[in-house]
Image (cartoon, rainbow, N blue to C red):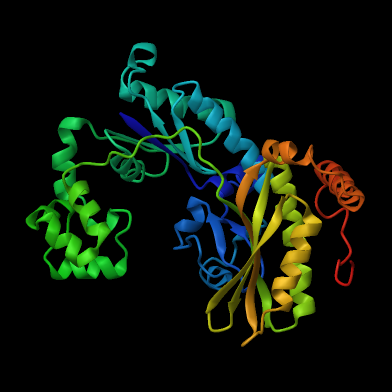
Amino acid sequence: MILHVDMDAFYASVEELDNPQLKGRCVIVGGQSKRSVVSAANYAARGFGVHSAMPVFKVQTICPDAVFLPPRISRYKELSAKIMSILREFSPLVEPVSIDEAYVDITGCEKLFGGVREIASSIKKEIKERLDLNCSLGAAPNKFLAKIASDMDKPDGLTIIMPEDVDRFIESLPIHKVPGVGKNTNDKLKLMGVSTLGDVKKYPEEVLAKRFGTFGGRLAKLADGIDRSAVTPVSETKSVSAEETLPEDTEDKNLLEKYILKQSEKIGRELRKLGIRARTISVKIKHSDFKQVTRSATIKEPTQSSEVIIREAFELLENYRMPDKARLIGVGVSNFISGMEQVQTDIFERDDTKSSDWRKLDKAIDTITDKFGTEIIKRASLKGRK
């Protein structure tokens, strides 16, 4: 059996935890300008129809008394680490899939902690007692069904699908609840007379594959209750990024550089905390017409230096010919190696004095930032430096 643990309105719940005066009020976590979107909303706000990714100006219309708060990612990560630690007390097979959800394979753990319901209830109880946070939990024979089950009875819910109940559950599961079935796919399936996952069985796998590609084949397997995805304990970081919707559309590259500077600093700190270095730096721009463009560069020596990320991002922006004003700017890094791999390379190379100085500066800034926050010290623009 596999569990899917999903924290309820995690960001907003953490804000209520740290500030009890917020309880009972509509709490929105996200940007505060009218062009921003909602990152998270508590259940009081959801009662007004507020949801993630909703534009803030709409929230201000339907929920004028809402409290808007900027996200505190470091605090959320701190509590997320404690949640994952609690889960690992019940099984070594814990796969975090985001900051607020994880899969837990409890196969074989019954002798230690009791049956599925007992284990699930104990996990909910431990998280509540130690952290004063609620979660919803789904249990099923595979990851696909466990994830759907965790969403069946939110908030603070517990839904268990035993192996003998799988066929009956699938027969009545609305097709739009299946991950990967978006509006277009849902419309096509409806035209085929498919309204539940059980209805998919009307069609051979070859027909579904021809109509929907590889997803058609997966859909056929899910209709038979088959999902062989394993719970993988280590979820490897694939990329680190930061982006921001601008208060106003702009084509001023000097202004965009200020955002890049701040974002690159944040990414550099994250890489140093993770102990990894990146080979590829990217700049993402979304224009006024919502067309999105990404420009990337792969560097010879992997880096975790904020200065290198800033320089490369500046150059990517400088070489990009803006066809229209930008409404969003972002920086990302990928193509990682571990810090240890880099150390093994460095011992055969002469240490560059300038690089060494920048590493010392990064370390100094990290120390000050960790102690006093990100607003206490700012790096001047690097434009024009050699």
On the image, the x and y values in percent for residue 62 come to 51, 69
Q: Compared with residue 348, is residue 286 higher up or lower down, i.e. above or below?
A: below
Instruction: Please indicate, yes or no, whether residue 23 appears anywhere in the rendered image.
Output: yes
Residue at the (12%, 62%) spot, across then down: 207
Quarter of the rendering occupied by the N terminus: top left
Instruction: Please indicate, yes or no, whether residue 20 appears anywhere in the rendered image.
Output: no
> Please, which residue is most extreme toward the top here?
111
Q: Compared with residue 322, is residue 39 higher up or lower down, i.e. above or below?
A: above
Please tell me in which quadrant of the rendered image residue 142 appears.
top left
> Relative to 376, is 115 on the left or the right?
left
On the image, the x and y values in percent for residue 231 come to 39, 34
- Depth check: 87 or 156 in front? 87
> Please, which residue is most extreme toward the bottom here?
323
Residue at the (48%, 51%) spot, across then down: 43
Residue at the (28%, 54%) spot, across then down: 177
On the image, the x and y values in percent for residue 151 come to 35, 46
> Please, which residue is most extreme toward the front here?
348
Quarter of the rendering occupied by the C terminus: bottom right
Please tell me in which quadrant of the rendered image residue 159 appears.
top left
- Depth check: 165 or 228 in front? 228
On the image, the x and y values in percent for residue 267 come to 70, 54
Callout count: 0
Residue at the (58%, 48%) spot, across then down: 11
